[in-house]
Image (tube, grey):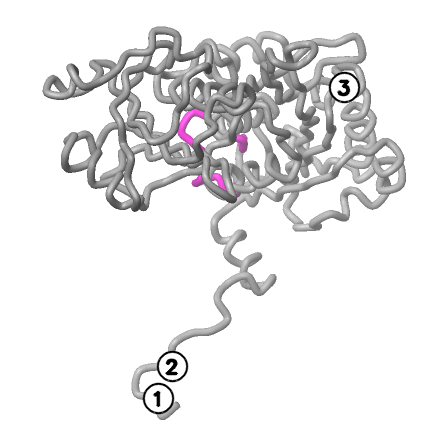
């Protein structure tokens, strides 16, 4: 991506953007909540690999650094090396810190899931503690994260168990959400992370590629907490944009590289507001396919994709790929495009024209129908 617009941004602007988004995509800089999520996911994966959870049941991990409530401490058991994954997890409530190295547990053998929830919320009075539920029963196993605790049972997010294959479809689904919530219109973009220079004239920010990388890497890091989302990695074949990598100490090599993402921002206008030629757009896309394949092969990643973010004033869907379909298939590079609209009004008009808006409405008041 770096060579796409090199005449418009420099190393200084890249360094400034990195400073503005310091910590994004680096697991060393994750906050305690993300480290809690990642650590529990790794523990569960290692436990499953060690067959230490032979009794399929439900367990709960509470982010509770102070350990069990005072009245339960004499009844709890301490596991000082929980991270070695030699201890059965099922039918227990675990009290852990964000690193999940040491754990305390109390038994939680319940026939109904609701009884387990009520035990944590009512009996332990810890319904607001961030919680991760591990369900080893069929058709599991699965992890469920409750950011507001088990008292808010409807606020739940699925978590990926570490060391499983993360497909491009899963990555694209997360990018869909990021696009919908943070990219699709100028108003949806976070303060200080703007992609438009002047949306009214169709000009794009000079550091749009770096801002886009930062927003995507932050979103992917949240979605896949056990992974390291690497951004702007140098390699002999160039500088790749985003790498989704996971530490897998139980596997040969110790690392699984799930995917390489090559990003392209398709600008409609130059900074002086003149039109970018269609040939130039075609060249960017063609280069992107080659880069995605080269970076994937160089890193030994499982998959490579070209992700285009089309900021031109006309919605063309996948037409930007028409000239590279054959070569992308030959190189096994997935192609995806997301359109960024220059205003909320333009986005609404697109939704109406595409039939995305609700087609059924309630009958007008007073209607005989």
- Judging by the rendered image, the residue that carries numbered circle 1 is 367
Residue drawn 38% across the image and 77% down it: 362
Quote the CA–CA distance across marks 2 and 3: 55 Å
Q: Is residue 188 magenta?
A: yes
x, y percent for residue 231: 60, 17
x, y percent for residue 206: 59, 23
Per the rendered image, the range of residues in magenta is: 184-197
Left or right of residue 156: residue 356: right
Residue drawn 37% across the image and 14% down it: 100
The residue nearer to you, when weighing 275 against 315, is 315
Q: Quadrant of the N terminus?
A: top right
Left or right of residue 211: residue 103: left
x, y percent for residue 131: 31, 30
| Above or below for 7 versus 150 | above
User: Between disc 2 and disc 3, whose residue precedes?
Assistant: 3
- Judging by the rendered image, the residue that carries numbered circle 3 is 295
| Above or below for 74 versus 262 | above
Question: The residue tagged with tag 2: helix, strand or loop?
Answer: loop
Q: Quadrant of the C terminus?
A: bottom left
Quadrant of res 89? top left
The residue nearer to you, when weighing 168 against 17, is 168
Question: The residue tagged with tag 3: helix, strand or loop?
Answer: helix
x, y percent for residue 333: 79, 33
Residue drawn 43% across the image and 25% down it: 192
Q: Is residue 255 magenta?
A: no
């Amino acid at each position: 991506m770096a060579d796409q617009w090199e005449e418009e941004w420099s190393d200084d602007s890249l360094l400034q953007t990195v400073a503005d988004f310091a910590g994004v995509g680096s697991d060393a800089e994750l906050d305690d909540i993300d480290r809690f999520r990642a650590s529990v996911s790794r523990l569960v994966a290692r436990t499953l690999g060690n067959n230490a959870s032979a009794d399929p049941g439900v367990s709960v991990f509470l982010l509770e650094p102070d350990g069990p409530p005072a009245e339960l401490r004499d009844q709890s058991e301490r596991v000082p090396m929980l991270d070695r994954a030699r201890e059965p997890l099922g039918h227990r409530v675990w009290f852990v810190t964000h690193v999940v190295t040491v754990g305390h547990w109390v038994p939680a053998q319940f026939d109904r899931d609701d009884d387990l929830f009520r035990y944590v919320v009512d009996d332990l009075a810890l319904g607001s503690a961030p919680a991760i539920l591990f369900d080893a029963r069929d058709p599991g196993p699965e992890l469920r994260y409750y950011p507001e605790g088990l008292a808010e049972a409807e606020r739940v997010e699925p978590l990926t168990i570490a060391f499983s294959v993360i497909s491009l479809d899963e990555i694209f689904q997360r990018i869909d959400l990021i696009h919908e919530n943070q990219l699709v219109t100028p108003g949806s973009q976070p303060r200080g992370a703007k992609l438009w220079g002047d949306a009214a004239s169709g000009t794009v920010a000079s550091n749009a590629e770096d801002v886009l990388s930062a927003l995507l890497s932050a979103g992917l890091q949240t979605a896949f907490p056990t992974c390291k989302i690497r951004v702007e990695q140098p390699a002999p074949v160039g500088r790749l944009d985003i790498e989704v990598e996971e530490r897998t100490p139980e596997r040969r090599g110790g690392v699984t590289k799930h995917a390489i993402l090559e990003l392209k921002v398709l600008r409609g206008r130059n900074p002086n507001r003149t039109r970018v030629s269609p040939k130039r757009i075609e060249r960017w896309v063609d280069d992107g396919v080659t880069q995605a394949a080269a970076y994937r092969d160089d890193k030994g990643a499982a998959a490579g994709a070209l992700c285009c973010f089309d900021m031109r004033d006309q919605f063309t869907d996948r037409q930007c790929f028409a000239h590279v379909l054959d070569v992308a298939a030959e190189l096994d590079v997935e192609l995806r495009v997301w359109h960024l609209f220059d205003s909320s009004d333009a986005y609404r008009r697109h939704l109406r024209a595409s039939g995305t808006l609700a087609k059924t409405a309630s009958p007008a008041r007073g209607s005989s129908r």
